[in-house]
Image: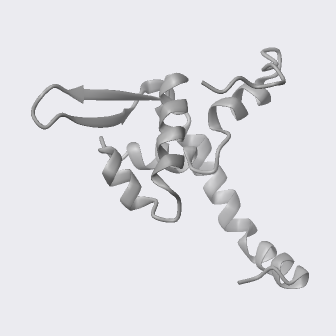
Amino acid sequence: MYKKKIPLDLDCGVAIAMEVMGGKWKSCILYELEKGCKRPSELHRHFEDTSPRVINQQLKELEMHGMIEKTIYPELPPHVEYSITDDGRSLIPIIRMLEQWGNDFRPKMVRILEKTGMAE
């Protein structure tokens, strides 16, 4: 697994939160898993703007940090499902607050992007 050049500062709560939540798709994955267990292919279809490789990496990191659980069903053909843990569920109110902040900031962001010529 990838080893970071700069060690994690365990004395900084923000650094710890960003270690767990940092990543473009992690909060979206948690938000989706709060609705129920999902197979990897369901998540890949839901987040079609990114590659399966990126989603798989984010799933692996979320599992490593204990935010989600991976269940492997030993049947033929075998299949896997991901579910959110209690620790992962504890992040949902924070994700909802971020979503609300983003919705409130949207008009300003549109103006910023238009002003800088970055609007689509």
Q: Is 86 displayed left or right of 76 in the figure?
A: right
Which quadrant would residue 38 be assigned to in this image?
top left
Which quarter of the picture shows residue 71? top left
Placement of the C terminus among the 4 image quadrants: bottom right
Image quadrant containing the N terminus = top right
Write the residue at 70% across / 58% down. Answer: 101
Q: Is residue 83 left or right of residue 99?
A: left
Count of numbered labels shown in the rendering: 0
- Residue 70 shows in the view: yes
Residue pictured at 71% horizontal, 23% vertical: 3
User: Residue sitting at 54 percent across and 48 percent down?
Assistant: 54
Residue 96 pos. (x, y %): 57, 50
At horizontal 86% and vertical 76% (from top left) the residue drawn is 112
Q: Position of residue 82 (x, y in %)?
A: 34, 36
Colour theme = one colour
Res 90 visible: no
In the rendered structure, the answer to whether residue 81 lies left or right of residue 60 reads: left
Of 111 and 118, the residue lying toward us:
118
Location of residue 113 in the rendering, given as x and y in whole percent from the top left corner: 82, 78
Residue farthest to the right?
A: 116
Q: What x and y, as percent, mark residue 80?
A: 27, 35
Viewer-side residue, 93 vs 114: 114
21 displayed left or right of 64: right
Q: Residue furthest left?
A: 76
